[in-house]
Image (spheres, rainbow, N blue to C red):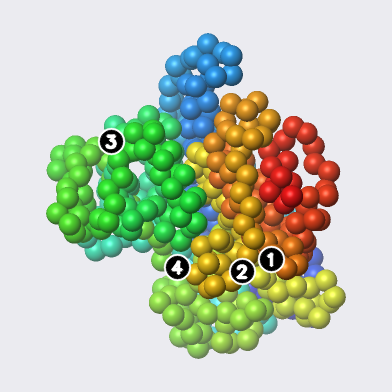
Amino acid sequence: MAMRFVVIGGGPAGVAAATHAARLGADVVLVERDVIGGAAHLWDCIPSKAMIATGGALSFLERSEGMGLETVNPHIDTLNLSDRLASITSHLENSNNELLQSQNVRIMCGTGKLVGTHEVEVTLEDGAIEVIEADAIMLSTGSRPRVPEWCHPDGERILTTRHAYPPPEIPEHLTVVGSGVTGVEFVHMFTSLGSKVTLIVSRQHVLPDKDPEVAYELEQNFIDRGVKLLKGARSTSIEREGDTVVVKCDDGRIIESSHALLAIGSIPNSDMLNLDAAGVENEWGFIPINDFGQSNVPHIYAAGDLSGKLPLSSVATMQGRKIAEHMMGKTNDQDHRYISYSKAASAIFTEPEIADVGVSQAEAFAHGRKVRVTKVPFSASAKALINDDPRGFVKLISDPATGVVLGGSIVGRHAAELISIIALCVQNQLTVTDLAETLFVHPTLSETLIEAAE
């Protein structure tokens, strides 16, 4: 009899685990209450990047004079934009459904919870309840925007990320609360779409967990585009007064704007899983896992945002695949590797883009680690000049003794694509010599990586 594998949550981790386990011979059931592909992924991540792409096209057209073209003045068609987002989401959801069906995965549209160590209860859309026996279970129900008690989003002028794709109207003046990855992406997006933006920065610079030099580059870009930065301020209340939104800070500063957007992180969707019924431990709603993705109950796994690891779709997808391999006894194969979370590449889709992987310069210095840091500006790149966009730089971190590439940061156009080259080096312990002696295409932005390696 085939191994019965039940997955609760059909986001990137769930789809990857379900399809991979099915290919390995498991009998797979996937339970999803919202959208196959994941609510956080298809209702947050993908629409935000699509809107950023629209804003980028708008910005490019507005500064087309630098490319030898007459300047044009395009405008936002919110109805067309909304249809575009819906079309992209629908296409991706259909692709996921087709993939799962091709692997004979049973898809159950409903809400799943644990009712025993090997039992999952599913409440279907029509209210019917079905209990499924499982040999192994994976929990991957994702997360939702965190909303503090002092804020009451109305979806019209006080927004969370789920209200912003697109918003009911393009804000005349938007106050963004939260200067992490999500917050700065919204600042960039709405500035590109024509909004005046104020960003509340609780620390002394945006992106407090990133390289300060990277954060400075982004801040300068924001300031050049007219963004107002309120540093060292924490929001204590957001209230609507007619068509005005009033944001109050702990230092007494008050900001009035047409809209406010909350981007202060997310919380795990574990409260409805009935974890106690199976004895699954959690910490603040997150489920601690080992290298194999197992919870404290060995046959119950957790992945994606729920696992408390890096909240990245790429990480969730890899977790799903690795969990399927472990569940099916494939972890002793020569090709199997543990996930090294410290080597995961990440990107921020601002303008310019920001991406990093591995050891950062600030992290190395903080731990007294000797590293070699090489920085090359894109202004030295022929391709950057051709693109009329010489902003940013490549920073490569390597071991001075061995030459092994330890990490890197990129600020500039297509940084999210270029960082993959450094990620490949970090993952496979390649050296700066390996990188420098690789023949890249000319002229390209990627050549800047070779210059940094040299």
The reply to whether dot 1 and dot 3 touch (C-beta < 8 Å) is no
In the image, what residue type sits under mark 3?
Answer: His
Q: Nearer the viewer, residue 232 or 82?
A: 232
Q: Give the mark, 4 or 1, whose residue is nearer the N terminus.
A: 4
The reply to whether dot 2 and dot 1 touch (C-beta < 8 Å) is yes
Mark 1 is surrounded, within 10 Å at the Cα level, by few (under 14), some (14 to 19) or many (20 or more) other residues, namely: some
Q: Residue at x 61, y 81 (%)?
A: 290
**Marks 4 and 1, how far apart in space?**
40 Å
78 is higher (above) or lower (below) than 183: above
**Marks 4 and 3, how far apart in space?**
32 Å
Q: Secondary structure at mark 4?
A: loop
* Residue 368, x across and y down, in percent: 54, 72
In the image, what residue type sits under mark 2?
Answer: Lys
Q: Residue furthest top?
A: 70
Mark 4 is surrounded, within 10 Å at the Cα level, by few (under 14), some (14 to 19) or many (20 or more) other residues, namely: some
Residue 269's disc is 4
Q: Decide if residue 297 is in sight here.
A: yes
Give the residue pinned by disc 3.
173
Mark 2 is surrounded, within 10 Å at the Cα level, by few (under 14), some (14 to 19) or many (20 or more) other residues, namely: few
Q: Secondary structure at mark 2?
A: loop
Instruction: Give the number of the mark in front: 4 or 3.
Output: 3
